[in-house]
Image (cartoon, rainbow, N blue to C red):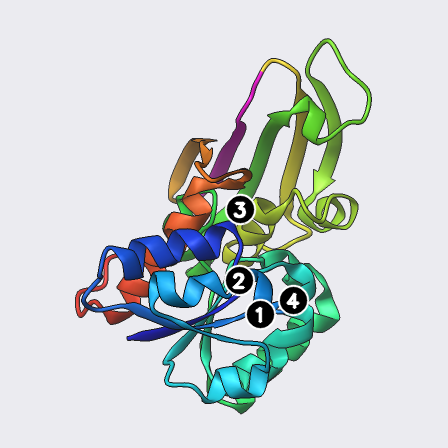
Amino acid sequence: MKIGILGAGAIATYLLEELNEKRNENITITSVFVRNYEKYEHLEEKYDVRLYTDIRKFLESEIDVVVEAANIEAVRDLLPTVLKQKETVLISIGALADEDFFKEIIKITETYNQKLYLPSGAIGGLDLIQNTTAVGILTEVKLVTRKPAHTLVDKPIDESTIIFDGNAREAIKKYPRNMNVSIALALAGIGFDQTEVLLIADPSISKNIHSIEVLGEFGEATFTITNEPLPTNPNTSYLAAVSIIGILKKTINPIKIG
């Protein structure tokens, strides 16, 4: 499978190293779309890829799937065009918090018979949430996210402080760049308005901690994930980058798990 990437930042570089430099036999990145060719020109020789600044030419290159590894703004600008021609893996799912944009994307997938893959990102357990939602036996989903205080508040604080308590829809509107996990949970489960979210600024921690509690007719479950950052970028979750490779391998593996 030949992959085209939107973006050339930390996640894109991680994917290039894992898939091209380590010579993955089944999945190879061949094309990369960037805004600034001169800035990223060195990637061509290092990873044996071709860079494009024209989205039309990028999509016409020999690629089977597009992986978005850019940002929310790029998703809004490019995803409608990309999805009309290629199956796409989307990591910046914050863009889907815009209800009108999400409806547009759903319509495109239906009209053009394309698939949009949403990796699990910085968390796990979405299979259980999707399965129980599918048969209507999931009743409650609560996310408690703790983040280093300096990433959420401007002034120093001495103790952990709740800075948001509400539902996923409200959380996304107030903290659009910090709530990708709540978007994933809401889409996989009982929706934006029913998914409870508690966001805590904690001066005693250096990593993001996500605790997910689900309740339903099946019983109950709790997941806690402490995220290590990507070694090359402290602002990017290691799991988020890994989840992209996981979903790519899942699409070509004849045995599907979960």
Q: Distance between the residues labelled 2 and 4?
A: 17 Å
Q: Distance between the residues labelled 1 and 2?
A: 6 Å
Identified at 46% across, 48% down, the residue is: 240
Residue in the foreground of this view, choosing between 144 and 153: 153
> Which numbered marker is on residue 198?
none
Mark 4 vs mark 1, foreground winner is: 1
Residue 133 against residue 32 in the figure, above or below: above
- The answer to if 73 sits in the magenta stretch is no
Identified at 59% across, 82% down, the residue is: 54
**Secondary structure under the numbered disc 3 in the rendered image:** strand
Mark 4 or mark 2, which is nearer the start of the sequence? 2
Q: How far apart are marks 4 and 1 (CA)?
A: 16 Å
**Circle 4 sits on which residue?**
74
Residue 249 falls left or right of residue 60: left
Residue in the foreground of this view, choosing between 15 and 154: 15
CB atoms of marks 1 and 2 within 8 Å: yes
Q: Distance between the residues labelled 2 and 3?
A: 47 Å
